Image (cartoon, grey):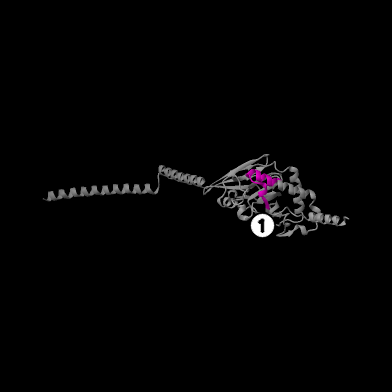
Amino acid sequence: MSDGSGGGSVRQRKKSSGDGNGTRARKSKATGSTASGSSPSAAQQHQMWARIVLMVGIAAIVYFTTFRTREKKFATQREVLELRTQPLDCSRPYLEEISKFAGCIPNRCGRFVSDKIVSPAEAGILLDLARAGFALGQSAGGASILDLHSGALSKGTQFVNVYRLPEAKQLFTSQHINVYRHVKAKVQQAVAENFRLSADALHLTHPTFFSRLTNATAKTIHDEYWHEHVDKETYNSFHYTTLLYLTDYGKDFTGGRFVFIDNEGKHNRTHVYIEPKRARVSGFTSGAENMHHVEQVTGGVRYAITISFTCDREYAMADPKFALDDDEDDQNAEERSAEP
């Protein structure tokens, strides 16, 4: 029994010894597993970076396909354009309003540009007129206007009436006056032809003005010409807007391009550029279909004329009554009174 109990004791020790080795083996495997988890292998690191790159790529694709701005040149400075047009669907508020005016409803909304409506010589005379007017006053903030209809002229941070300045009678010549009126009539006819309107249904409206833009820092809200806007929302009287450029982009000034903003869906936009050129005329319907802005001028001086038209006789205005006209009227009256 002793031998029997002794033999049993030996077997128990061997079993216990075997259990100890198993425990140490399991601990060793567990320790190896923990070490592997805290320090990924090269293959695991490669997979992790591949996933990161894939996610960044997907995010970039989603962003650039969801929020996308394209650029398109509608008229460059080097081109000489007989006529270029871009038809657009009218915005609903614009169409609802203009449908009230017979003979003034466009066949389709849109925009056009031409270098053949006004001659370079006529544009040169109007540039001389603008320079003469702005010699009497300019905005301190880089965006000056001269309105020959109301007489408003930028001066510092305010406006003055140019016709109350004695120098104006000497600066504005009969040639200036005649060319201004003639050019306005030609632009009016071009709008009528391009949108298939009756020219008699179009009326000059306020504001119609010369602009002089530089890179000076804005001093008042009137100097901040670069904000996106819709003309019909800014000026209730507008139905058709035109611009006549008097100086050349890239030669007389830098920056200052005219930019239409076409929204295509919620996030996609197309910027459509016109590079100003002396004697170039652009025209467009004034509704939300033609949201736009002017780039900030970065150098030089940009001159242009905004000529605005309405279909509503209530907002119509006559050609400007220059101070020179008053002198001529007075002289004619004196001659008539001297007649026998």
Farthest residue to the left: give it. 1
Residue 164: in magenta span = no
Toward the viewer: 177 or 9?
A: 177
Does any portion of residue 23 appear in the rendered image? Answer: yes
- The stretch of residues the image draws in magenta is 186-204
* Residue at 74%, 59% in the rendered image: 161
Residue 111 horizontal/vertical position (percent)? 62, 45
What residue type is disc 1 on? His
Q: Position of residue 138 (x, y in %)?
A: 73, 56
**Secondary structure beneath disc 1?**
helix
Magenta: main secondary structure equals helix
Residue, x 15% and y 48% (percent of image)? 7
- Residue, x 77% and y 48% (percent of image)? 178
Q: Is residue 136 left or right of residue 189?
A: right
Crowd class of label 1 (few under 14; some 14 to 19; many from 20; radius 10 Å): some
Residue 311 rendering spot, x and y as whole percentages: 64, 51
Q: Is residue 165 left or right of residue 339?
A: left
Label count reads 1
Residue 301 appears at what percent x and percent y? 71, 49
Note whether residue 227 is visible: no
Query: Would you name the residue on which mark 1 appears?
Result: 222
